[in-house]
Amino acid sequence: MDPQHEADEIRGVQQRLAERFPDLEPGVVESAVVAAHSELTGSIRDFVPVLVEHGARDRLSAIVRAHAASPQEPG
């Protein structure tokens, strides 16, 4: 996969995850995607977008679970 196509795919991953996790700030979603992407340094890049999406989704799910488990402030 050429670098431009990979970058386009990663932007699509970020958009899909932002839609899936609408309660999280866009910066949190972006950070999860960047972190997942930075872990993948191999020379075979064909599956990088899929792996990034899975890794970032797992991170974001953990954030949502942590927020749900924490005591809520009385409003």
Image: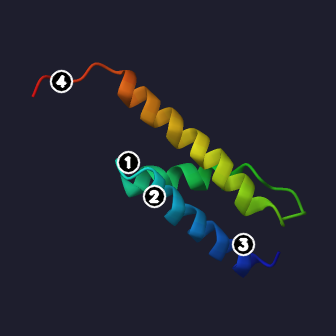
Q: Which residue does the numbered mark 4 point to in the structure image? A: 73
Give amino acid for label 2: Ala
Label 4 to label 2, Cα distance in Å?
A: 25 Å
Question: Which secondary structure, mark 3?
Answer: helix
- Say whether disc 3 or disc 4 marks the residue closer to the N-terminus: 3
Mark 1 Cα shell of 10 Å, populated few (<14), some (14-19), many (≥20): some
Q: Can you tell which mark lies on residue 6?
A: 3
Which quadrant would the N terminus be assigned to in this image? bottom right
Label 2 to label 3, Cα distance in Å?
A: 18 Å
Residue appearing at x 75%, y 76% in the figure: 3
Query: Measured from the top left, where is residue 35 in percent x and y?
Result: 61, 49
Give amino acid for label 1: Leu
> Quadrant of the rendered structure where residue 26 is?
bottom left
- Say whether disc 1 or disc 2 marks the residue closer to the N-terminus: 2
Give amino acid for label 3: Glu
Query: Measured from the top left, where is residue 55 in percent x and y?
Result: 66, 46
Question: Which secondary structure, mark 1?
Answer: loop
Mark 2 or 3: the one toward you: 2
